[in-house]
Image (cartoon, rainbow, N blue to C red):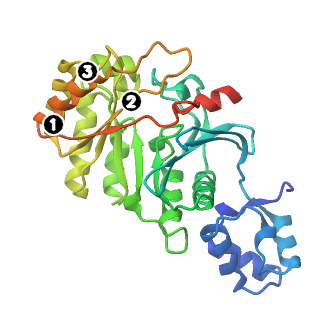
Amino acid sequence: MDNLSRNIRQASLHDISHFLISNGEKVFRAKQIWQWIWQRGVTDFEEMTNLSRATRELLSHNWYFDRLEPIHIQTASDGTIKTAWKLYDNEIVESVLIPGNQKFTVCVSSQAGCPLGCKFCATGTLGFKRNLTYGEIFNQVTAAKAAAEARGFPLSNIVFMGMGEPMLNYENVLTAIERITADDGLAMSPYRITVSTAGIPDRIRQLADDGVRFNLAVSLHAAKESVRTSLMPINKTYPLKDVAESLKYFVKKTGTRPTFEYLLLKDINDSLEDAKALAFYCRQFPIKINLIEYNHVEGSDFQHSPEKKRDEFVKYLEHCNMIVNIRRSKGKDIDAACGQLAAKEV
C-alpha cells in the first residue's frame, strides 16, 4: 500500500460511491464492495470476484484493509482455540474460540494491552499499547465465524472479555458492534453479545443513554472496598459506590439485568464473609452473578479456590435468592487466561 492509501473499513458507503464515480466506475459497484467488506468479511480485494480485475486493482492501489495475521494458535483438548494476532504495527492481541453445545463463542480483544493493571490478569503485565480500530475488532469476529463454520457449527455468541477495557475504546467497540449486528453487516443479534467492563461509571451511563441492546457485564471480583482495590487499582478512581450508582441508572433506563463477573481466588475473595458482602451489594439492583474458575497465570501467586469453598459461596448466594452461574475454566492445558499467549509473543 502507498502513503495515500486509505483504510477501506473506515470508509462510509458514500465515500466508496464518490471514489468510484470519480474514477469512472459504476456507482452500483459500491454496494457490492460494501457487501464484501461487511457481510462476507473479506480482507483482500482479490476475493471480490464479481468485480473486474481493473476495478480490483483500482481499489488495491487506493485502499487497504487492517488485516490481522495469526502468528500463534493453540488448541486445547476441550476444543478451545486461542489465537495470537499480529496487527499492522506489530502489536499483538488475542481472541479465543470456545466450543459449546453445537455452537461456538468468541472472546475478542478491544485494546492492545490494557491500562488498568488488574493484579490477576496477564494482560495487565503488558501495559497499554493502543486502542483497536473497529475493523480490527470486526476481523476477530469474522475469523472466528469462519473457524466455527469450518468445524460444522455456528458462531452464536460474542464476548468482549479479551485484552483491554472496552469502555476505554468506546466508539470503536460500539461501531464494531453496529457492523456486527447491522442487516448489511453480519446481522447477528445484539442479545448474543456481551461487553465486559471493569466498571467505568460515566461510560455505563453513556451505554444507557445510547440505548444499547447488548448485554453488560461488570468485572467485580470483590464487594469489599479494600479487597477490590488490592485486585483492581481502578477501584481507587471508581469505588464500589460509584459503580453501583451507574448500574442503578443503567437498569432503570434500559430495563435489563447486568451480570457481575466474580473470579474466585483462594483466601482472597472466596470466604463466607465475601459472599455476604457480595449479596449485600447486589441488593441494590437486579443482577446475575457469574462465578469464574481461576486460570493460573505463570508467575502469579493467585490460586484456584477449592471446590468446597466455591460450593459454600454458591450455596449462600442462592440462599439469598441470587441468580448464580459457575463458569468452568476452558482451555486449561493451553495459555487460556487473558493475555498469556500475547505475553509470550512480546
Position of residue 124 measured from the top left corner of the image (x, y, whole percent): 53, 26
Residue 71 horizontal side relative to residue 14, left or right: right
Quadrant position of residue 8: bottom right
Instruction: Report the residue at 68% width, 79% height from top.
Output: 32
Element under disc 2: loop
Assign a secondary structure to mark 1.
helix
Quadrant for the C terminus in the image: top right
What residue is pinned by disc 2? 293
Vertical comparison of 233 with 62: above or below:
above
Quadrant for residue 310, please give it.
Answer: top left
Residue 98, position in %: x, y?
A: 51, 46
Question: Horizontally, is 279 left or right of 184 in the view?
Answer: left
Q: Residue furthest front?
A: 77
Numbered mark located on residue 318 in the image: 1
- Which amino acid, mark 1? Glu
User: Could you say where residue 239 lies in the image, as x and y percent from the top left?
Assistant: 29, 27
Q: Amino acid at mark 3?
A: Lys
Residue under pointer 3: 309
* The one of 232 and 246 positioned closer to us in this rendering: 232
- What's the distance in space between the residues labelled 1 and 3, CA to CA? 14 Å
Classify mark 1: residues with Cα within 10 Å, few (<14), some (14-19) or many (20+).
few
Q: Is residue 10 above or below residue 342?
A: below
| Left or right: 313, with 123 as reference point | left
